[in-house]
Image (tube, grey):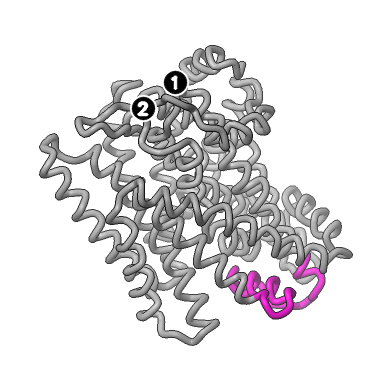
Amino acid sequence: MIQALSDFLWGWPMVILLLGTHIWLTIRLKFPQRHIFRAIRLSVTRDKDSEGDVSQFGALATALAATIGTGNIVGVATAIALGGPGAVFWCWITGVFGIATKYAESLLAVQYRVKTHDGHMVGGPMYTLHRGLGLKWLAVLFALFAVFASFGIGNMVQCNAITLLCSQTFGVPANWISFCVAFAVALVVVFGVKGIARVCTALVPFMAVLYALGCLYILFHNGHYVWDALVMIIKSAFTPKAAGGGFVGVSMILSVRYGVARGLFSNESGMGSAPIVAAAAKTKTPVRQALVSSTGTFWDTVVVCLLTGLVIVSSVLAHDGISFSDGGSLTRHAFATIPYIGSPLLTFGIITFAFSTILGWCYYGERCIEYLGARNRTLRHSVVWIYRMLFIIVVFIGGVQQLEFVWNFSDLANGFMAIPNLISLLLLTGVLVRESKRGGVL
């Protein structure tokens, strides 16, 4: 049933709604992607004397921690296995145009954020829908969908990837690995958003640079096949049943479907998750934080996912005939090219990527639970702790579930979460244009 619902939701209607919103906002906001280098500079510059819970870079690092995960490694490989090389192109296109959407949703999150009685800044699509459009019922739906998504994309998928890789690499039973991951998550989440932000700020830049260096080494090793891989990715994106070089031909709709789905899974543009932490950033203007947040999609999909796609496709071409029936085996074979440290590097990358994603999504779920919670502070605090305990338990459960179920559940939760957020972006385009002009982007 989960698979049937996921297949229906991620048919052409979702593809059109998601990519259509990306393209519409890109045009309406006059291609905000052109400000990406200014945004990168702002991301490492403090906005002094501004209100918020974490620094702009801390908010970006937490958002990146929740997005740079198994979607960039196993997710891209799975898209290639199921949708062919062309899925890489659609994943990348989703990222390029998704920069505009990430900018827009983060701007609205800061614009409509509120300060709680205990001095914390909270925001996100649920507050945008509630305060910006007066659609409280839709805001409640978004918060509910986000909580479910936190158990899928931000929890079960990540722990499943860790346990699968570690059990295959080191022969450790999955139950023990799942328990260790759940225990490590428990040690961090008890400190709340500031503890999560501290860990992510230290972990994300290091692991991203290390993974990128590994990808660049493999591309150098596969140098004779990189151009052929790029050509195959582009041709397969537009040619039904394109095949060759060890790949089995698939229909164009499968390339688009899996490419867009994994693109959203990877960068989460349009899903409404990253704006939740963007609202907590120390910033004076919505536009400034919106620009900083947009760099998350750039690094996550435009850079990291493209590197992963090129690595996998070029490795298949370089070693014609290897199995690509699942994303995990594809990725392991590609990184085995690096002598001595290839497998440990992949293992370390997936573990750190997945672990940081779990932390980021725990924060997203907490904020949605707080929005749904009671007005009484003590009761709200108790509900948050119940969510944390349940989240930790699901971390363990996700590690021992079948991979296919975990991915289908995550795709379904992502789609349900994206719909209310995309509605708010389309209905509040006028606000986006007005604030962008005020902030000097238009």
Query: Which span of residues is magenta-colored?
Result: 314-342
Circle 1 residue: 428
| The N terminus, quarter of image | bottom left
Q: Residue 422: percent from the left, percent from the top?
A: 45, 33
Q: Which residue is found at the position 64% from the left and 61% from the top?
A: 210
Residue type (three-letter) at the residue carrying disc 1: Leu
Q: Quadrant of residue 227?
A: bottom right
Q: Residue 317: percent from the left, percent from the top?
A: 80, 69
Q: Residues within 10 Å of mark 1 (few under 14, many from 20)?
A: some
Q: Residue 410: percent from the left, percent from the top?
A: 43, 56
Image height check: is 257 above or below 222? above
- The nearer-to-camera label among 1 and 2 is 2
Circle 2 residue: 128
Viewer-proximal residue among 215 and 49: 49
Q: Is residue 306 magenta?
A: no
Label 1 close to label 2 by CB (< 8 Å): yes
Numbered label attached to residue 328? none
